[in-house]
Amino acid sequence: IQHTTNMKISTTAVTALLALPATTLSFTPSAAFRRRATGLNVLEEPAVAASAPPSESVFLTAETAKKSIEAVGSPLYAYSIPVLQENADKCLAFPNAYGLTVRYAMKACPNAAILQLFNKKGIHIDASSGYEVRRAMAAGIPAENISLSTQELPADFAELVDMGVKMNACSISQLEKFGYHYAGQNKSVGIRINPGVGSGGFSSSTTTFSKTNVGGPSSSFGIWKDFVTDGTVPEIVEKYGLNVERIHTHIGSGSDPAIWQQTAAISLSFCEMFPNVMTLNLGGGYKVGRNPGEPTTDLIEIGKPVQEAFEEFAAKNGRELKLEIEPGTFLVAMAGALVSTVQDKVSTSGDSGHVFLKLDAGMTDVLRPSLYGAIHPMTLLPGSGNSEDVGTEMESTVVVGHCCESGDLMTPEPGEPESLDERLLRKASIGDILVIDGSGAYCSGMSTKNYNSFPEAAEVLVDASGDVHVIRSRQTLEQIYANEVTPPESIL
């Protein structure tokens, strides 16, 4: 391996690419939608109002939903083993020139059973904190299969690295701390770079702030591109004798495939600057259509041009780079659902009146509608657990959660968490089952659990036969306050 003190830094190609204007594209499906050009698949028919209630959700029938409730109570998260495996196979088939490592972004859904399922498929782990690293190892994931890219460098980062965990320095200070600890040891490290553009599903801008955009000048994620091209990063690398073996970029969740491909080209130019780099990690953020009419990224379509770019890089530089990707949403979003119960039904009158369905779940379980104005598919099933009882009546309703919080809204206007909307659903009775699909990603792991002292919901796996397997028991009330400490009575 060539020592970094002898490396030659080339910034010309990077600077030229970074000077290109960022392209802002829209995701709105239309009749002229071109899958090949955008790397997206979309339902050919536009979404239309349902004429009759559906008898099942994405992967749950009334019978399997009821069986799940009988196993652990309501609410609960259910995950489909066949869908998880199918999505894993799609990611493992991502086009690549010289080798591929798929890393599951475990923050999307960190249950040990999910990690173990993907581990058996040969998928590695992308961790976003030292705690996630420890959690993955506790689930049986080998340290050498874990990569850490974090906003907060853990105090024990060196212990994790010494175990075999791969670390990407995500800021100048992180790189300095890593270098100081491993000075003169030719220690391998990855560098996460903010390439100057970002792309997230709730914003079309590539440079302004968005809750799902993690690239560009309005994002704190990664080392800003200019600190790479102006010599700052190479000087730190040379000062401590580090071996940069990996470049990492990630631009957002639900990103535009065209911008993702553009970022891949920029990232390859960063690889040219560090002659020992043998791996390029392009992150994840692949868009998933949760609802009819919403596009889903076609991994084969977006991967082919990237594969060709890797081949061109090899021909030019004599290095066959391995590719890493870090899907989270793509792997688990549509493989998971929140199964809840309608525990009340109320109405208001007048021009602004509504029928409200109150669930035994809410932002304590699925925060995305309240946070982003995200729209999730919903299916109302009979509380009897019998598909024959679905009936034919439909009703426009507002679905709300159980928290004492006006923002606990499950049916906001798209992208507008402050505005409520109605959803045409099967006419509901108290005790009916409401399945909220698309809840496999950033729901159980990103909820406001324990607000109003509601316990954390249970989780189950549903196999191909419809059998239910518990992978998390429901939290008890005592577990919620178990770590509270009573102070001396004299200060109260």
Image (cartoon, helix red, strand yellow):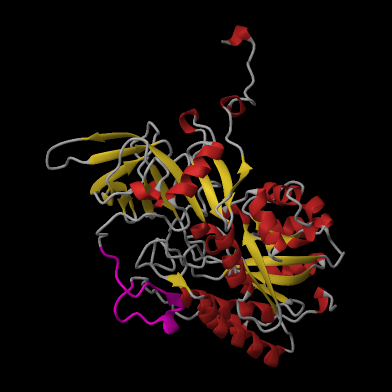
* Spot occupied by residue 164 in the image (x, y as percentages of width and height): 81, 59
Q: Describe residue 306's horizontal placement relative to residue 373 as left or right.
A: right
What are the residue bounds of the magenta stretch?
Answer: 29-48
Residue furthest top in the image: 490
Number of marks: 0
Residue sitting nearer the eye, 161 or 229: 161
Q: Is residue 6 above or below residue 315?
A: above
* Spot occupied by residue 349 in the image (x, y as percentages of width and height): 15, 36
Q: Is residue 447 visible?
A: no
Residue at x 34% of width, y 56% of height: 54
* Spot occupied by residue 462 in the image (x, y as percentages of width and height): 57, 52
Q: Is residue 252 above or below residue 40?
A: above
Residue at x 33% of width, y 71% of height: 28
Q: Quadrant of the C terminus?
A: top right
- Whether residue 44 appears in magenta in the rendering, the answer is yes
Q: Give the quarter of the image for residue 463.
A: bottom right
Residue at x 31% of width, y 82% of height: 32
- Whether residue 439 appears in magenta in the rendering, the answer is no
**Most common secondary structure along the magenta stretch:** loop
Q: Give the quarter of the image for residue 308.
A: bottom right
Q: Is residue 305 above or below residue 443?
A: below
